[in-house]
């Protein structure tokens, strides 16, 4: 999906839904194209690839679950004539329509911590725990990472079907759906994924910091919007049932990898009440998060060449084992 296709899809969506496309602006174009329609009060979210589009229906279910439990989050747009069965298929793309939340200030760590506490308080029936025999002569701790799941496992609740946390499967899918990659890059990313999978499996032997449950899955400050009615969460592509330590990881990694300044991670830890960096499993989650931040754009890298310089810098720093290299956000380099 390139800029011309985005424009054509916006025009088609506006004709179908009787929305005003004038002055539409691109808020983000990485895995999804996210556009504001200022004269209609809505935001369109267009899946950037088939792999991303598969998640759109689950995103709609999650949005409704969060609304049902009063979690502050962006809400699906409803209006006379708008089909109830979002996402919509327009020009072969999965499209969702959302109420526009205009930011009045930048989000701060306390905002994210408060929102995550609300998400983590949502009661959700857990899936059956995997049965793993205890090793002889050792007691076995209750796993924080739910098993060695290699793909989606349905988890039913009265209003939503979620999947269990399976980050390695998602990384492998993104690598498989990438456009042409240099052989050495492909080999490195596959080997790094294998190494992360092995380390994640070993986390089952650690005492968890928190009980597992509903998680946002991609909980960094960029997925918080502070509107006139307060902060809300957005972007539910990764929401699932999994280890809550994972929701505490992005802001910690962000403070280590991005030049944010200040004491963001410490402020977040105080506001949430737990410091994931004190947990023995954090180095593994950091490695996973950084691999995700490199592979997340692979399906759209060819169509959005503005992403490539930062992607190249990230891959090279991982290959060097440079844990101190400061990354930039894809949004800044892809505008």
Image: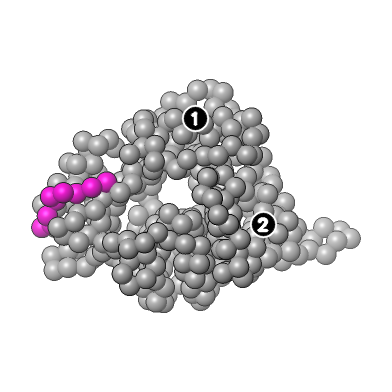
At which x and y percent is residue 107? 43, 61
At which x and y percent is residue 160? 41, 68
Q: Is residue 309 visible?
A: yes
Q: Secondary structure at mark 2?
A: helix
Q: Residue at x 66, y 49 (%)?
A: 284
Q: Nearer the viewer, residue 136 or 293?
A: 293
Q: Is residue 216 visible?
A: no
Q: Residue at x 56, y 63 (%)?
A: 268
Relative to 198, does residue 124 appear above or below in the rendering? below
Residue at image mark 2: 277
Q: In the rendered image, which quarter is residue 8 located in? A: top left
Which label was assigned to residue 175?
Answer: none
Q: Is residue 42 left or right of residue 171?
A: left
Q: Is residue 91 left or right of residue 320?
A: left
Relative to 197, does residue 116 appear above or below in the rendering? below
Q: Nearer the viewer, residue 321 or 48?
A: 321
Q: Residue at x 21, y 36 (%)?
A: 4
At which x and y percent is residue 36? 24, 53
At which x and y percent is residue 308? 42, 31
Distance between mark 2 and mark 1 Cα atoms: 27 Å
Range drawn in magenta: 18-26
Which label was assigned to residue 312?
Answer: 1
Mark 2, Cα crowd under 10 Å, few <14 / some 14-19 / many 20+, is some
Q: Is residue 73 left or right of residue 316?
A: left
Question: Can you name the residue that lies furthest to the top here?
Answer: 183
Report the number of discs: 2
Q: Is residue 104 left or right of residue 115?
A: left
Relative to 300, does residue 213 appear above or below in the rendering? below
Relative to 195, does residue 284 appear above or below in the rendering? below
């Amino acid at each position: 999906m390139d800029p011309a296709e985005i424009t054509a899809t916006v025009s088609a969506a506006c004709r179908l839904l009787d929305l005003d496309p004038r002055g539409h602006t691109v808020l983000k174009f990485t895995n999804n194209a996210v556009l504001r329609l200022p004269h209609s009060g809505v935001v369109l979210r267009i899946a950037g690839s088939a792999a991303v589009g598969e998640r759109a229906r689950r995103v709609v279910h999650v949005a409704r679950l969060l609304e049902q439990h009063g979690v502050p989050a962006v809400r699906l747009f409803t209006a006379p004539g708008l089909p109830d069965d979002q996402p919509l298929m327009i020009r072969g793309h999965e499209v969702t329509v959302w109420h526009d939340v205009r930011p009045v200030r930048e989000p701060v760590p306390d905002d994210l911590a408060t929102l995550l506490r609300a998400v983590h308080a949502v009661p959700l029936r857990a899936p059956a725990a995997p049965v793993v025999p205890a090793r002889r002569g050792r007691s076995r701790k209750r796993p924080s990472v739910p098993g060695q799941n290699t793909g989606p496992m349905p988890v039913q609740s009265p209003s939503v079907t979620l999947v269990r946390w399976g980050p390695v499967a998602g990384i492998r899918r993104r690598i498989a759906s990438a456009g042409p990659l240099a052989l050495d890059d492909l080999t490195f990313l596959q080997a790094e994924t294998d190494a992360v999978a092995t380390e994640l499996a070993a986390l089952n032997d650690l005492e968890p910091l928190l009980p597992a449950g509903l998680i946002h899955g991609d909980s960094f400050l960029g997925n918080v919007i502070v509107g006139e009615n307060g902060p809300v969460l957005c972007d539910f592509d990764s929401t699932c049932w999994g280890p809550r330590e994972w929701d505490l990881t992005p802001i910690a990694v962000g403070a280590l990898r991005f030049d944010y300044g200040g004491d963001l991670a410490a402020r977040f830890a105080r506001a949430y009440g737990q410091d994931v960096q004190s947990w023995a499993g954090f180095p593994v989650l950091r490695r996973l998060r950084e691999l995700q931040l490199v592979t997340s754009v692979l399906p759209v890298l060819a169509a959005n060449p503005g992403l490539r310089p930062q992607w190249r810098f990230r891959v090279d720093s991982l290959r060097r084992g440079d844990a101190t290299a400061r990354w930039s956000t894809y949004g800044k380099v892809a505008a």
